[in-house]
Image (cartoon, rainbow, N blue to C red):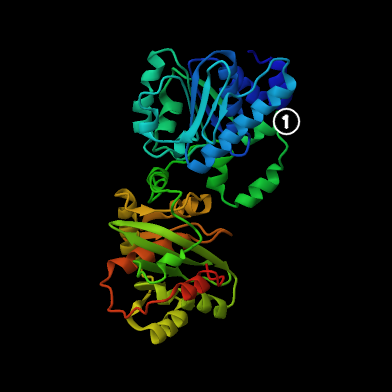
Amino acid sequence: MSMASGDRRAILLPYQQHWVNDRAPLKIWLAARQIGKSFAIAMEAVTEAVRDRCNNLILSSSERQSKEVMQKVFSHLRYLRVRSSEIIKAERETKEEVVLPNGSRIISLPANPDTVRGFSGNVFLDEFAFHKDAREIWKAMYPTVTRGYKVRITSTPNGKQNMFYELWAADSRFSKHRTDIYEAVRQGLKVDVDELRAGMNDADSWAQEFECRFIDEATAYITYEMITACEDENATREFTVSNTDGKKVRDFYLGVDIGRKKDLTVFWLWEKIGDVFWTRMVKELLRVPFRIQRDELYRLLPFVRRCCIDSSGIGAQLAEEAIERFGSVVEAVTFTSAVKEDLAVTFRRKFEDRLVRIPIDRDIREDIHSVKKFTTAAGNVRFDAEGTESGHADRFWAGALGIHAAAQPAASVAYEALDSRDFKSFATSGCF
């Protein structure tokens, strides 16, 4: 079977064609978001599989992304069936694998060192800067090169403390491709750059995600590498509970950072399982009345062991009223320099030890990364972040407050067993 270059030109932009047509054994692509990296990777995997009998393994940073890449593989194959005079019909298709009549296989999976160890074939590492255990993955798969197979690596930058940056910056063996958003538009990508930039509203994020610049993490208190290592698809933004959990007391802890007009109010709900804190909800409220913030808090408090609320400024009234109603379950936390340092240090330690799990979410990732540690001229330590329309590290402080809540001695709380109907009513009430 063969695949004509004209077929590729019909569906690929020039920079994507340049990538697919480069047959170097090792190649790496530094690319902006939303320019079609995964689309080109899927096309190259199909091209390799059609051209010669071979195995092709695509590793993505999450299960969701691996499924999306596989859908692109299926789309390319369907396109070829229509365009080609030859019969290109898969012998077998699953959500993770396709086998072609010539025996070639294309497999798309979430990144994992065990997945690639012992694999014989071409390896595609998609968004490699965001892979957990990237160094272990690299050590496990690199021997494939010695057997004549190809390695393809693509990613948007994710700071400098990761394997992708090291390969891009220092490894001369790679054929290197770089496509920022401006170059992609120049070569035909139909996007509004000004609209994209306005939506980001963050100079560092724009520089990294669209201009392909590696942001120096020297001042970032929690690095991208630490954050990425703790991202997990089983950590969720929205809380759901099955009916079977109705009478089970779960180890929930809540952190609340209060905002009103300029900043977000954020509710971060953690569940402690063993030594690990799993995110069960991150809910943001922007410019909502005090009454709605209180209602959201009161719906959550009966289900947590402990809650810490930012009582600085306008949070003082909410914290005071919550303590009057729920007693020692609630702790008011006034943000002083010493308190913020304690919160930040404890939160960072959880990331260092990989004892937290957070959703795979760009807003959460950037929020946590935005906090920087400063030392003033007087020698005092300060933790702060630049305020944007997305908040002022409000998610960071809500998450840190929730971890702080779990660190305090739990009050003796009388829990009333709820039947499944009560719990289901709560879970579907709109609170989550």
x, y (%) of residue 79? Answer: 70, 26
Residue 168: image x %, image y %?
46, 27
At x 72% / y 30%, what residue is drawn? 188
Q: Which corner quadrant of the image does residue 161 belong to?
A: top left
Seen in the picture, residue 10 relative to 428 is either above or below; the reply is above
- Residue that lies at the very extreme toward the front in this rendered image: 91
How far across and down, in percent of the image, does residue 393 sit? 47, 59
Residue type marked 1:
Gly
Q: Is residue 366 left or right of residue 101?
A: left
Q: Is residue 239 left or right of residue 403?
A: right
Residue identifier under label 1: 188
Q: Is residue 379 visible?
A: no
Nearer the observer, 351 or 210: 351
Indicate the quadrant containing the N terminus: top left, top right, bottom left or bottom right. Answer: top right
- Which residue shows up at 60% across the image and 30% down it? 73
Q: Secondary structure at mark 1?
A: loop
Looking at this view, is 366 or 110 the one in front?
110
Q: In the rendered image of this protein, does residue 179 appear above or below residue 25?
A: below
Percent position of residue 417, x then y? 37, 77
- For label 1, the crowd category at 10 Å Cα-Cα, with few meaning under 14, some 14 to 19 and many 20 or more, is few
Residue most extreme to the left: 409
Q: Nearer the viewer, residue 127 or 124?
A: 124
The quadrant in which residue 252 appears is bottom left
